Image (spheres, grey):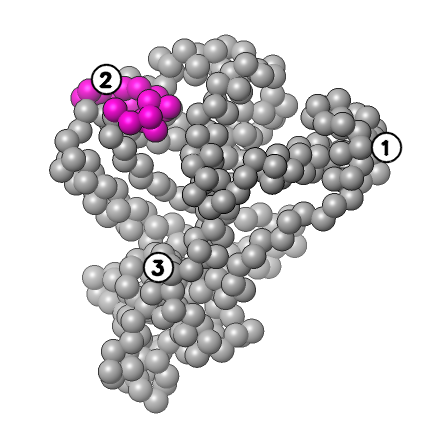
Amino acid sequence: MNDANDPLAQETTSSAGLPQPALAAQAMSRLLRPLARLMIDHGLQHAAMVELLKKALVDEALAGYSPADKSASDTRIALQTGLHRKDVRRLREEPALEEVVAPMVPVAAHIVARWISDPRFLLADKTPMPLARTPRLGDPGKPDFSVLVAEVSRDVGARAVLDELVRMGVVSIDPEGLVSLKDTAFVPREGLGEAFHFLAGNVGDHLSTAAFNLSPDRTEPQMLEQSAFSAGLSTDQAQALHQTARRLWADALQQFLVTATVAEQRSASDDGDKHRVRFGVYFHQVAEDTPQAKAGVTLPARRHKRKPSP
């Protein structure tokens, strides 16, 4: 059984190509629950959230027009968004809120990605090789941590990157100076700044994909956006599935990064348009009798559903 049996999915399919405000409102009511939880947990109150929403509405409305398009008037945008023209006039000139994140995070993430995907930095079993902190501490002919950093970026020193990875709990250093990766992915253990950085990137891109696929004006093929889910599970079985999901992701991540590294190298000499991609996974577990579970899709026990591939 798949989501095509969901009445919401059926209506969306049968009405493709036309705006569906009622269906969008139903979906938004589900999406807003975890967003509300995030607001409450981190002290973001209603007035601030409304202002952020207004700014996003104006920015997205403007994004539909070219810079020279005179039809992007305050009145037209007000009609599209339901905002007052005074708000539109004020917000269209207001700069976007800059993300506050440590500048080392993107570099550190790329270094870990190279570490777990480049055969030179892997052991025979394809796990990340412990690297000597400096060439002096390593064996002749073997790559060290400074070589890894230099291949990713020459703008920052290996010591600065290492200190940041240690601070975030991503790597450890033994008494002999060997640097070991603690996980087969860039998973910072400390720092809300880093956590919110990845929240914005991961969830933002996921929602952007879903919005693109549902766009009434879309002419390009759908992007990949699907999931598998199960219900009626005991606590032990749910946790076992979580571990299985982590193992599957570790394998898929390594394969994807190897391919992505080759793709980046081949793209370097291409003078055409450049694109960025994100490939991710998530696992969610919640007791079925909680409000959070009831706000989502209700499934009968021992039934499995999979979103159809685009």
* Residue drawn 38% across the image and 69% down it: 167
| Front of the two marks 1 and 3 | 3
Mark 3 = which residue? 189
Mark 1 or mark 2: whose residue is earlier in sequence: 1
- Vertical position of residue 217 compared to residue 11: above or below: below
Mark 1 or mark 3: whose residue is earlier in sequence: 1
Label count reads: 3
111 and 166: which is toward the camera: 166
Q: Give the SS element for disc 3.
A: loop
Span shown in magenta: 289-306
The quarter of the rendered structure image containing the C terminus is top left
Instruction: Mark 1 and mark 2 in contact? Answer it, CB < 8 Å.
Output: no
* Residue drawn 48% across the image and 30% down it: 32
| Front of the two marks 3 and 2 | 3
Answer few, some or many: residues within 10 Å of disc 3's Cα (few below 14, many 20 plus, some between 14 and 19): some
Answer few, some or many: residues within 10 Å of disc 1's Cα (few below 14, many 20 plus, some between 14 and 19): few
Check residue 300 in the rendering and tell me which mark sits there, or answer none.
Answer: 2
**Left or right, 302 with reference to 178:** left
218 and 283: which is toward the camera: 283
Q: Where residue 159 appears, x then y in whole percent?
A: 43, 79
Instruction: Mark 3 and mark 2 in contact? Answer it, CB < 8 Å.
Output: no
- CA–CA distance in space, label 3 to label 2: 36 Å
- Vertical position of residue 219 compared to residue 41: above or below: above
| Front of the two marks 1 and 2 | 2
Q: Give the SS element for disc 2.
A: loop
Dominant secondary structure (helix, strand or loop) of the stretch shown in magenta: loop
